[in-house]
């Protein structure tokens, strides 16, 4: 029986593990931190809720009004009410990643994937990168912070380990340009929070970002306030964040910062996303819309599509798929998201 390890328990890894486990393939999913709160605005499109069968309990807020705020603070309200009329069925979902990720990961585990609370520290990729693949990892399941050193050998690897992917390094996938995003979670008193009941804000202007936008996205009892910019402007990021806070200050004045977080966002796919029997999905692959930084849906979608290809090519785990088989996933994923990545520099060169 085919043995597959999925490294990373975010949306891409969980969606891959779920499909593999459902088909009976022996699947491990590694996540270094089971309560991981991935730095993220947590905004998801409605199609994600439907396609990935997400329960309403993981959605903190259903946003129906997006306020776009110009450099001179003019506000344009883009309201779904104007498009669809007043309805509860159309919205942008706002989630806390620790809640959403835990739900998807646990679902994969309940369907039969072995969930390992462990940090994969090194990967031996075998002869000519063809495997079998020997993983060394620190297993934290006993509660020991240092973890117990362990090894696992598998036939196929899925790198779902985000923008700083170790799997990408091990397979020499090549680099991508990144944007740097910064975010503060600000807890608001009930009254101030009620303003953000079903409303999010996007700010534009050089004070908030020279090349991206600032945001205030509502969550259960707080707002996520953040901004992003290209890596070359990285040194400006704290000043830009100050810019967003200034612009939104009349509503944030009684807020309490409960978390400060920062993380890279890929700007385009990596040059190589399949090498031997190793495949990258989600941020590790670089599947993010450059103009908006949206990556959750494409992470889930790429994880699922990669796993579906493995299930089909392996005849439900009876055979070991080839590099050519895995590249079919890239082709299909390229067809799926080429349009979304069109803003990406030289986007066509990233697709087969
Ligand atoms: C500030 C910010 C705001 C954003 N806002 C939005 C938004 O509103 N909407 C949207 O759609 N996208 C947003 N994005 C992008 C989105 O967060 C990513 O595209 C998405 O998280 C990618 O999912 P993934 O599963 O591929 O990777 P990740 O979510 O990064 O998950 C990778 C997982 O792998 C684990 N891991 C890593 N290395 C190892 C290892 N060696 N061993 C074991 N486990 C490991 C990590 O702990 C993590 O849980 C935002 C990004 C940032 C930085």
Image (spheres, rainbow, N blue to C red):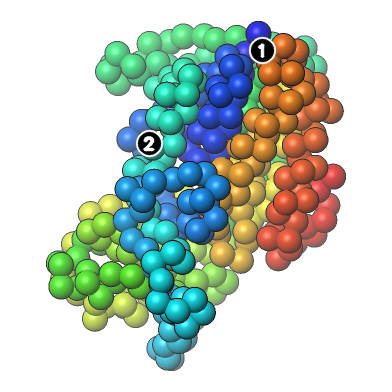
Whole-percent x and y of residue 33?
37, 31
Residue 234 in the figure: left or right of residue 158: left
Quadrant position of the N terminus in the picture: top right
220 or 36: nearer the viewer: 220
Residue at 35% over, 42% down: 98
Residue at 49% over, 63% down: 228
Residue at 52% over, 44% down: 52
In the rendered view, tell whether residue 54 sits above or below residue 31: below
Residue 35 in the figure: left or right of residue 256: right
Q: CA distance from mark 1 to mark 2?
A: 26 Å
Quadrant position of the C terminus in the picture: top right
> Which quadrant of the structure image shows residue 73?
bottom left
Is residue 18 visible in the rendered image? The answer is yes
What residue sits right under mark 1 in the picture? 2
What residue sits right under mark 2 in the picture? 102
Q: Residues within 10 Å of mark 1 (few under 14, many from 20)?
A: many
Secondary structure under tag 2 reads helix
């Amino acid at each position: 029986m085919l043995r597959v390890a999925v490294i990373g328990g975010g949306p891409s890894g969980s969606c891959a593990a779920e499909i593999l486990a459902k088909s009976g393939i022996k699947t491990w999913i590694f996540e270094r931190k089971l309560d991981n709160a991935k730095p993220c605005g947590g905004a998801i499109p409605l199609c994600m809720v439907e396609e990935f069968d997400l329960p309403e309990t993981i959605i903190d807020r259903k946003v129906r009004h997006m306020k776009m705020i110009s450099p001179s603070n003019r506000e344009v309200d883009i309201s779904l009410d104007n498009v669809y009329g007043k309805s509860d069925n159309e919205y942008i979902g706002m989630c806390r990643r620790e809640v959403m990720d835990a739900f998807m990961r646990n679902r994969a585990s309940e369907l039969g994937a072995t969930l390992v609370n462990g940090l994969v520290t090194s990967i031996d990729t075998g002869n000519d990168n063809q495997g079998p693949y020997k993983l060394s990892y620190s297993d934290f399941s006993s509660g020991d912070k240092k973890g117990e050193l362990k090894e696992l050998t598998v036939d196929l690897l899925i790198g779902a380990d985000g923008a700083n992917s170790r799997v990408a390094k091990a397979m020499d996938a090549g680099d991508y340009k990144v944007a740097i995003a910064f975010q503060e979670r600000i807890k608001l008193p009930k009254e101030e929070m009620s303003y953000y009941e079903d409303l999010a804000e996007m700010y534009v202007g050089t004070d908030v970002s020279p090349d991206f936008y600032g945001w205030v996205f509502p969550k259960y009892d707080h707002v996520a306030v953040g901004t992003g910019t290209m890596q070359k402007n990285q040194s400006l990021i704290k000043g830009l964040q100050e810019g967003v806070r200034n612009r939104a200050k009349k509503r944030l004045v009684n807020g309490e910062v409960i978390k400060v977080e920062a993380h890279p966002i890929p700007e385009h796919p990596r040059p190589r996303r399949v090498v031997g029997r190793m495949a990258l999905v989600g941020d590790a692959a670089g599947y993010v819309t450059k103009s908006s930084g949206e990556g959750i849906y494409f992470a889930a979608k790429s994880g699922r599509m990669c796993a579906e290809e493995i299930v089909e090519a392996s005849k439900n785990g009876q055979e070991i798929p080839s590099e050519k088989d895995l590249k079919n996933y890239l082709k299909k994923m390229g067809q799926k998201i080429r349009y979304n990545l069109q803003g990406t520099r030289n986007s066509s060169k990233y697709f087969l």
